[in-house]
Image: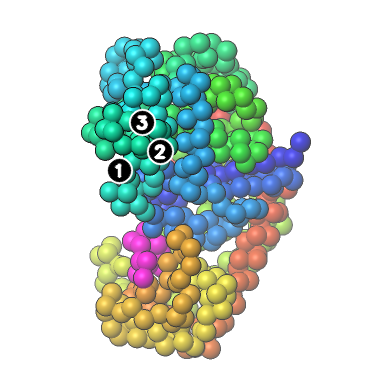
């Protein structure tokens, strides 16, 4: 069977070292196994994942050399598929509507399975659930009745389950009971940690599992299982914080009749107090302080991977490519902004500017943007307030699908997470220090860096070993 791996970051913030260790581990594992690799953006927690964060994550993954062999999967585009699975479970009686809160279920088992609860405005035995992305659809649309039942208590011919115009409807989650399922999965074998016992995680396992939250958001566990099945993932490589979730996901695979993949859990990155490095804990973005090859080598060392002589030589080659960026651009910019740098409040760090320039170069090459027009635009950004300018150096290149990357020079779609989303700072870094001819050289150097980065990743994958990974959390 062909090996298929995946990396599935959540776009709640930029990539930090905790997410990168899982990202590189999953990507290098797929390369080492001569298999295929899929990127998936898990953006279903809509309040935590603004739609503008997705292109930022994709942009950073491109810089870091983590590439999908297929089109990137965006979970929020897959809502009808999740609803199809949930509705099938509702009709079969496996899933049920629940009015319990999370706190109540911690105190006692959920009693709702036998109550035959259903959303208001629906008199039928079951109501189909239907999801929308509230970041795209307006509130009135998201609450509209749009399912196909013939009768509802309000006398209309349509009722959409949890989307009915009812306050009570929004308070119902959808669950399945795990009491009879969990005993079947007393243990599983992890490719890094060996045999793991469910009894060691019983304090984290509830007797019922949410499939769809009361706020109408598809639950992580369901979406993860459905996607991994649909994408044909043969091994899931992810952080050890998901070990308890693996047991409940194995139950879901059983219920849905899917074959479960293998699992490999990488150690967590924690601070000296044992706290997991995470976006919620305001972990620093990797590309704010490191260049891609530096981040790759640092991550491999954390994973106890051997760096070959050839890999080290490639890394030195990459460092020479960044000489143009770092020495001729970012260092000069840092000197020009010396007082801000010393005060700790410079707009962008040298590494962030370097990564921004490389990302900008990739977009210019991919979209065939005229470097001379871009140079003139950056000059104007250095002289004027960038936030008041809306003219694009390459009119029309920002148009496209809703997940198209924001304009590289900030004409719209600016996002505070992106290294290139502060065009006034980037504009000064470029326009003050380089000519149009030098700008073209920078673009070509960035492309050479990208190629060398890919070569370095493939070189490291040849000696990558899951057996060498640490078993315990990594303290940094």
Cα gap from disc 1 to disc 2, whole angstroms: 12 Å
Above/below status of 246 relative to 424? above
Pointer 3 and pointer 2: residues touching (CB < 8 Å)? no
Residue labelled with disc 1: 143
User: Which label lies toward us, 1 or 2?
Assistant: 2
Q: CA distance from mark 1 to mark 3?
A: 18 Å
Residue tagged by mark 3? 151
Foreground of the two, 40 or 162: 162
Q: Element type at marker 3?
A: loop
Q: In the rendered structure, are the residues bearing label 1 and label 2 in contact, judged by CB atoms less than 8 Å apart?
A: no
Residue at x 52%, y 84% (from the top left corner): 370
Q: Which residues are magenta?
A: 412-422
The answer to which of 123 and 109 lies nearer the viewer is 123
In depth, the one of 471 and 34 nearer the eye is 34
**Residue 168 image position (x, y, % from top left):** 25, 29
Q: Residue 205: x, y in percent?
A: 43, 19
Q: Which mark is residue 255?
A: none
Q: What residue sits 46% from the left and 24% below the top?
A: 90
Q: Which residue is mark 2?
A: 147
Q: CA distance from mark 3 to mark 2?
A: 11 Å
User: Does residue 326 appear anywhere in the picture?
Assistant: no
Which numbered disc flags the more N-terminal residue, 1 or 3?
Answer: 1
Tell me, yes or no, if residue 149 can be seen here: yes
Q: Residue at x 47, y 36 (%)?
A: 83
- Residue 70 vertical position relative to residue 365 in the rendered view, above or below: above
- The kind of secondary structure the magenta stretch mainly shows is loop
Circle nearer the viewer, 1 or 3:
3
- Density class for disc 1 (Cα within 10 Å; few <14, some 14-19, many ≥20) is some
Is residue 322 located in the magenta-colored stretch of the structure?
no
């Amino acid at each position: 069977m062909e090996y298929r791996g995946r990396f599935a970051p959540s776009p709640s913030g930029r990539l930090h070292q905790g997410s990168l260790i899982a990202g590189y581990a999953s990507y290098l594992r797929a390369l080492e196994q001569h298999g295929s690799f899929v990127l998936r953006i898990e953006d279903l927690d809509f309040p935590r994942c603004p739609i503008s964060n997705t292109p930022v994550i994709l942009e950073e993954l491109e810089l870091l050399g983590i590439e999908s062999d297929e089109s990137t999967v965006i979970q929020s585009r897959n809502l009808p598929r999740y609803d199809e699975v949930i509705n099938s479970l509702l009709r079969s009686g496996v899933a049920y509507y629940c009015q319990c809160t999370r706190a109540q279920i911690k105190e006692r088992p959920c009693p709702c399975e036998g109550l035959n609860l259903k959303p208001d405005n629906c008199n039928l035995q079951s109501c189909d659930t239907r999801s929308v992305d509230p970041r795209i659809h307006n509130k009135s649309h998201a609450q509209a009745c749009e399912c196909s039942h013939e009768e509802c208590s309000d006398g209309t011919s349509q009722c959409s389950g949890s989307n009915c115009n009812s306050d009570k409807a929004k308070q119902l989650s959808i669950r399945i009971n795990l009491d009879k399922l969990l005993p079947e999965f007393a243990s599983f074998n992890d490719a890094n940690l060996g045999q793991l016992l469910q009894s060691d995680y019983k304090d984290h396992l509830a007797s019922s599992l949410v499939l769809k939250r009361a706020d109408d958001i598809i639950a992580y566990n369901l979406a993860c299982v459905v996607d991994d099945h649909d994408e044909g993932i043969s091994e899931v490589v992810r952080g050890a914080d998901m070990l308890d979730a693996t047991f409940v996901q194995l139950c879901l695979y059983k219920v849905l009749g899917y074959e479960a993949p293998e699992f490999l859990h990488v150690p967590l990155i924690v601070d000296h107090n044992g706290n997991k490095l995470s976006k919620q804990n305001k972990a620093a973005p990797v590309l704010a302080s490191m260049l891609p090859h530096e981040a790759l080598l640092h991550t491999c060392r954390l994973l106890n991977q051997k760096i070959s002589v050839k890999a080290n030589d490639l890394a030195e080659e990459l460092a020479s490519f960044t000489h143009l960026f770092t020495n001729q651009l970012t260092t000069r910019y840092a000197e020009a902004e010396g007082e801000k740098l010393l005060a700790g409040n410079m707009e962008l760090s040298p590494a962030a500017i370097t990564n921004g320039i490389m990302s900008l170069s990739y977009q210019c090459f991919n979209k065939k943007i005229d470097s001379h027009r871009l140079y003139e635009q950056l000059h104007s950004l250095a002289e004027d307030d960038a936030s008041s300018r809306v003219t694009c150096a390459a009119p029309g290149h920002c148009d496209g699908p809703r997940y198209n990357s924001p304009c590289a020079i900030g004409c719209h779609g600016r996002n505070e997470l992106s290294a290139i989303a502060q065009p006034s700072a980037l504009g000064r870094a470029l326009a003050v220090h380089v000519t149009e001819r030098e700008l073209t050289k920078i673009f070509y150097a960035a492309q050479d860096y990208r190629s060398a980065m890919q070569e370095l990743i493939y070189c490291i994958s040849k000696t990558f070993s899951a057996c060498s990974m640490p078993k315990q959390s990594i303290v940094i």
